[in-house]
Amino acid sequence: MKAKLDCIPCLFNQAFRTARAATDDRILIRKILNKVGEKIKDIDLNLTPPEASLPIYKLVEEITGNEDPYKDIKKKHIKTALSLYPLMKKKVSASLDPLKEAVKIAIAGNAIDMGSTTENIDIKREFLRIEEGEFLLKDLELFRKRIQEEDEILYLSDNAGETVFDRPLVELLEDMGKNVIYAVKEKPIINDATREDALLSGIHSTIISTGSSIAGTVLEDCSDEFLSIFHSAHLIIAKGQGNYETLSDVKAPIFFLFKIKCRPISEDTGIPVGVMMLEKSKAK
Amino acid sequence: MKAKLDCIPCLFNQAFRTARAATDDRILIRKILNKVGEKIKDIDLNLTPPEASLPIYKLVEEITGNEDPYKDIKKKHIKTALSLYPLMKKKVSASLDPLKEAVKIAIAGNAIDMGSTTENIDIKREFLRIEEGEFLLKDLELFRKRIQEEDEILYLSDNAGETVFDRPLVELLEDMGKNVIYAVKEKPIINDATREDALLSGIHSTIISTGSSIAGTVLEDCSDEFLSIFHSAHLIIAKGQGNYETLSDVKAPIFFLFKIKCRPISEDTGIPVGVMMLEKSKAK
């Protein structure tokens, strides 16, 4: 999907949040805000939101020299999520429908998103509130059926920390004998997971890089190696808004698992903000 | 208090929110965002936040020709608040401490603020949640004492709709024989109350204009008539963040009643975001 007018103030907020994470120098932060202000007129709403946001993140990197502003936050999120991992596994094994439970946990983990407007993320609360959460697992039965039919599943990850929330689902799929290929970003962008983050999170599957360091999965920016896996995949799990934003118009066997975090996505999907959803791609 | 770095993205968000309220024309909204972007470098953090925001609101007005983007929203807020007025009065008369109850209602009404980051304001919920709300009425006993000592009280109002929440306190003071002078803005700015809004809200006190159309109370911009009342007042009630932002450094007998809505104010007061407070001015 293309970026919307709403994305413009959101990008400005992201610039400020990232600038603050990248440096304590107030003069540099002000400089970033001024430069982002000048670039507002150049934001191209024909791009997807992650593509439109890239120049803003590059600017923060250029001005602060910090290539990974969310490094410490990512580590902290992974650590907190790991402390909850035994409870996640218990929840799944105690459930009458382990797949559904693992799916819910994986989607709940999508709250760990430094690109969205949330300032402070309370990971424990997100986990403990799963039971109260609003889930709309529209295509769960189709998802269940497709899993049974396929041996290999491409799993497009989203954020560091969320990676731990992915494990119950990934491990359930592996226990069913499926080969899960877990795709991460080539280099840090926002708090998206890299290979290092996935390993720290205890992901034991085959980990591949998309070859890209843009949030979501912008196929034009991915490596040939990743593209050959993507295009030959018969079943793809895509986590997070960024993957929805960049792949919603791509014809592929994708199930999107994410939390609706803003009005543009709510309008595009017809689902209210706050809802956690599983939906098959509608691209034709 | 002076504006902070946080105020810059907040102003950008305010511009977008106000642009959307002022027009449905997406091209005009984009034009506003581009122009605001260009003006970011000119935002003067030596000003108070309401003064720093003024050029942004002026820009929305210039580009859309809409002098009162929140006109309909203000009317709607007043109407909803009026539907709760009988419950407010009941709450006060049933309380063992009517003044405290009226103060709490007045502060709870401060949630009705289109300048802060809240997109949708649920006025009924704000009212029904008063009991659960976090109040920090630090200087309530001093306030009570000062009321008893004075015959005349200058009441600096804040937002339309909040005006109805002011009534139980204003009317209680009048029942005690006090003369309440209720000050409003000269012309519309954000959703701040004007004379018309105060009248629609059922304020029966003497209503005066500050002479200014900047949020809060910027004395340099007020009329001589208002200034003579302000400077001779022995007891002033100032509602809302805007009044705190513009008067916190002014030596005057002010009690601030408002909800803490953002980090800069939280840092300035040392009180967490979300807390509803009553505090005497500390300016020396």
Image: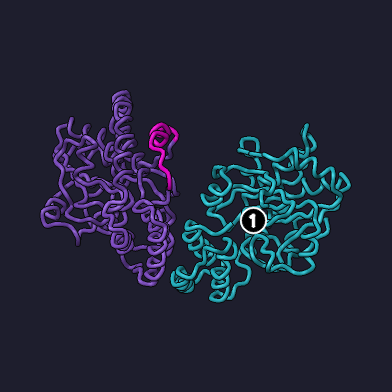
Chain colours: A cyan, B purple
Image vertical order of residue B203 relative to residue B245, above or below? above
Q: Secondary structure at mark 1?
A: loop
Categorize mark 1 by other alpha carbons within 10 Å: few (<14), some (14-19), many (20+): some
What x and y, as percent, mark residue B218?
Answer: 23, 58
Instruction: Give the residues drawn in magenta, as a range.
Output: B119-132
Look at mark 1 in the image and give the residue it sits on.
A249
Quadrant housing residue A56? bottom right
Query: Residue at image x 69%, y 41%?
Result: A104
Quarter of the image with the N terminus of chain A is bottom right
Image vertical order of residue B242 relative to residue B151, above or below? below
What x and y, as percent, mark residue B209?
Answer: 16, 49
Identify which residue, A265 or A205, lies in the foreground: A265
Quadrant housing residue B32? bottom left
- Inspect this view and state whether residue B1 appears: no
Count of all numbered marks drawn on residues in the image: 1
Identify which residue, A18 or A212, lies in the foreground: A212
What x and y, as percent, mark residue B5?
Answer: 42, 65
Judged from this view, the residue extending furthest toward the front is A284
Taking the image as shown, residue B127 lies to the left or right of residue B201, namely: right
Which amino acid, by three-letter code, is at mark 1?
Asp
Query: Residue at image x 64%, y 66%?
Result: A214
Q: Is residue A257 magenta?
A: no
Image vertical order of residue B4 relative to residue B150, above or below? below
Q: Is residue B121 magenta?
A: yes
Q: Chain of mark 1?
A: A
Query: Residue at image x 39%, y 48%?
Result: B260
Identify which residue, B246 or A10, lies in the foreground: A10
